[in-house]
Image (cartoon, rainbow, N blue to C red):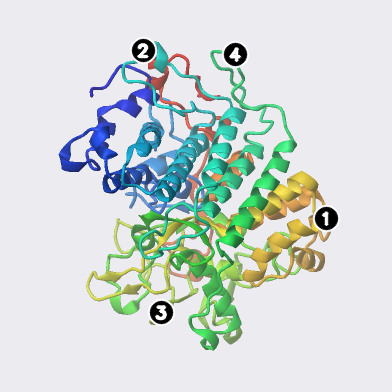
Amino acid sequence: MKKLLIPAICALLISAAGCNKFLDVVPDNVPTIDNAFTMRQEAMKYLFTCYSYMPYNSDPGSNPALCAGDEYWFARPYPVSEEPVQIAMGFMSPGTVYMNEWGRYYRALRDCNIFLDNIGKVVDLPDYERIRWVGEVKFLKAFYHYQLFLRYGPVPVVDKNLPISGSHEEYKVYRAPVDTLVKYIADLMLDASKTLPPEIADRSTEMGRITQAIALSMRAKVLVTAASPLFNGNTDHIGVGKTERPIFATTYDAAKWDTAVSACKLALEACERGRHKMYKFNELGTQLSEAMNIQMSLRNSLCEDWNPEIIWGNSQARSYTMQRLSLPRLDPDHLNNESVSGALGPTMKMAELFYSVHGVPIQEDHSYDYPGRFKLRTATAAEKEFIYEGYTTASLHFNREPRFYASLGFDGGMWMMKNKTFHIENKAGQWQSRKNIYDNNVTGYYAKKLVSWKNEIQAEHRLYVESYSWPEMRLADLYLLYAEALNESKGPTAEAYDYINRVRERAGLPTVQDAWTNWSRTPNKFSTREGLRQIIQQERLIELAFEGSRFWDLRRWKRSVEELNKPINGWDIVQEKPEFYYRPRLVFRQSFQMRDYLWPIHEYDLLVNENLVQNPGW
């Protein structure tokens, strides 16, 4: 099979690259589809080929949502691929499309269609298993369309593979309008859910495979995304296809939020059947204080592999590299161990994002000295679980909510691990300070949230990492999607408050109503749709910080122009004394334009298929 001169969307579906992938799964090195579907064992290999296109979202160099936004920053030379950093710096162009997944996901769709067209031929496959496999691949097919949708907006739907013998004109496909594409994805996920198991029965071999809860939860996320401002009434993205059909939904439709509410409710019911619940740490019992138990619940809701809060763990995206880049040289007995670098540096805006100890934004808390947040303060014995007793650090690090201390490491901050509790000393010449030109932290903050407490820095360059599957969806995520959809559909309701407060309760915070009434400068904020919208959005940005949610959330809310044009700041990490270290230092001045909400389609694809329309602004 040779490449044909056809649009890249379809060329990549039938290209030699697709065949080379196929060679990995057929028996006896005979690259024919017929042989791949003669027996159950070979068909299972093809099923896993369909899974093999899952995004490597635990890899900072492969997941744009981690390093192409404003949550992290790096010192150069970068410890990950430069492509996401180039996006963060605004260097995308139609001739240089960084992290371009167009061809990869259309190859995935080709393989999914081949599987669905041929799975009925397998003679020794029980009907119940065939039905389940079909549901899994239907979901994957919908999910890969969704991944394209996130990046490029409206894209061509590939429900069936085009024939290899087709004419050049047959391959000149059109981009589907947003509403058509979203309906296709959501309907396919719903259809898939009907034949999927409520939970994984064989946890030793099948974790990561698709369940009803996964299919319906991702469907809910798709419909919330489609109801959000980027795709619902966005007059900035006006585009017309060659058939004169508008491909962007420029008229606001409130009913989309009603649809999203129903989808979230259906997903929550599936999660209940699948026995998902909010994770709470109990491994050490009464050995820990209540405050530390809360911290460990927050950290391990992400890092404890296959815990009941994880709706979908991506078993193909393990977290070893992510953890190595997040973990600083914590252990003073092994400071020369360069297996850990702490090079993944959360930005100062992320440190300021978390609430005060009272559960409201630090700018709103009438008891919090926001203008004095950069002043120096020395930790007392009462604060020793959070900041090393007697250590001088910034006032910004005191009186913050539990998620701040569970998510961030900082100069003077405490960091509990299984074998010992450490503290960080990050100023020039201290333990965690810069040692060479490679793999250095540039902001003064570390992503503690991503690091398993069971890791161990050992002698020489040995490192034990308790790896975990990357969570594509947690129950807390779904709770907040439901609260958001309820508020947009009906305004503030008791049910919307309830689902926000379920997330806050695990974080050791008072309810939204109590926190704002007692501590906010705008005590009635939660009682209006606009006010509760701001609260829900900040709650999502905090709860899901550093997990790759912020990047897509800011886009769907159309807030990237606001947030990604703010400077990237960190502490002045080359200074030795606290009074000089604790001065905000500009790391990079980010720039984001309206066109950056969507990836450009590569100019080559437009040349070979004039029926494709470029995204606005490119």
Q: Which mark is residue 168?
A: 2
Marks 4 and 2, Cα distance to the nearest angstrom? 22 Å
Q: Which residue is mark 4?
A: 244
Query: In what element is the residue under mark 1?
Result: helix
Q: Nearer the viewer, mark 4 or mark 2?
A: 2
Mark toward the start of the polypeptide (4 vs 3) = 4
Circle 2 packing at 10 Å, graded few (<14), some (14-19), many (20+), is: few
State yes or no: discs 3 and 1 in contact (Cβ < 8 Å).
no
Q: Which mark is residue 527?
A: 1
Q: Nearer the viewer, mark 4 or mark 1?
A: 4
Mark toward the start of the polypeptide (2 vs 1) = 2
Q: Nearer the viewer, mark 3 or mark 2?
A: 2
- Badge 3 amino acid: Lys
Q: Quadrant of the N terminus?
A: top left
Circle 1 packing at 10 Å, graded few (<14), some (14-19), many (20+), is: few
Circle 3 packing at 10 Å, graded few (<14), some (14-19), many (20+), is: few
- Badge 1 amino acid: Ser
